[in-house]
Image (cartoon, rainbow, N blue to C red):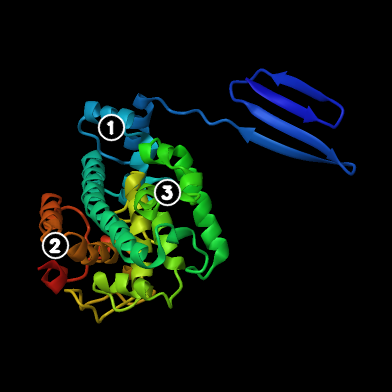
Amino acid sequence: MGENLFLSKEWVYICVNRTRRASRQISVPQAGHFFYMNSIEKQFPLLPDQIKILQQRGLEIDDSDEANHYLAHVGYYRLADYWQFLQKDSVRNAFISGATFNHVIELYNFDRELRLLLLDAMERIEVSFRAIMINMMCPVYGSNWFTDKRIFFNEARLNDAIEKIDRELERSDEEFVKQHDKKKTGFEHPPAWKTLPILSFGTLSKIYRNIRDDIKEKRIIAKVYGLPQERWLQSWMQVVSILRNYCAHHSLICYRPFSFLPREIRQVKLPWIKNIPPAGSVVSEQLYYQICIVRYLLQTASPGNDFSYRLMELLVKYRGIDLEKMGFLENWDEEDLWQ
């Protein structure tokens, strides 16, 4: 059923137009003129129709029951993020010759397992980063240094961080939050060793980035991770934070271009890569460089980890994945970082 909706300051009149698809027209008088907006409600296709649409566009589906399961439990538009790489025509959405639903599921499962692998690694980096910041800053600047404007160079960013901290504390059901006595302690917030663990990784990295560069502990923290200066750790922690958000929200990561590019560095303390993607190149925007950063930071956060082994095992399991599309360079696995 469709509607024509006419609006003015004094009255509203709805005229019902009995058609199968809804068509809405809004007319608002402004200085003697009318503005019209037409919209047509799209019909969402049922599961059997979704399968037919894919087949009509050239996707081979050998097992309709399996396809029905994935479309029902993963979703047409979520899977579309993956089958777009098997399409040759973005207008008609036509698939390349030989494209199969199995190819789509293989890419989807690979991306899912890769996200889980990265989440496990980034969790260790996040926990380590919190602990290092607390251990380095509290003995010198006190238990509530994260609200001390003398430590930070941008007060607006500090206030924004404090607002986020307040929201996190309000949402938290941790017992230490309920027991915090502002009058007794003289502080608005619980101490850093209680407050920082409940903050998001993004907020934590922004707090670090906002610390004044002449605060020597900022550089010391960077050196803990084998980086010569704080600007690299700032950049790399932001990379990890953004990547973690994509993984945590189940977004496609394997063939995704990343808009935030990490600072390029060659001279570092720990094993690294020699073949660094050139700044501004397509490869620098792809996942490989992001994974290298995770692997590098993990050397400090979790020495002796099996990340390299598990990554290579995953790539062997899914041999059909296009590594070049992920930014992996030739002989990447021979780099010192991956030994």
Q: Residue 106 location, x and y as percent?
A: 21, 44
Q: CA gap, disc 3 to disc 1? A: 46 Å
Q: In what quadrant of the picture does the N terminus appear?
A: top right
Image position of 129 with respect to 281: above or below: above
Which of discs 2 and 1 lies nearer the camera? The answer is 2
Say which residue label 3 marks: 190
Left/right of residue 232 with respect to residue 26 in the rendered view:
left
The kind of residue on which mark 3 rests is: Pro
Q: Quadrant of residue 77?
A: top left
Residue drawn where x is 31% and y is 41% of the image:
58
Residue 54 visible somewhere in the drawing:
yes
Left/right of residue 20 with respect to residue 101 in the rendered view:
right
The kind of residue on which mark 2 rests is: Pro
Say which residue label 1 marks: 70
**Going from the N terminus, do you reach mark 3 or mark 1 first?**
1
**Going from the N terminus, do you reach mark 2 or mark 3 first?**
3
> Do the residues under discs 3 and 1 have CB atoms within 8 angstroms?
no
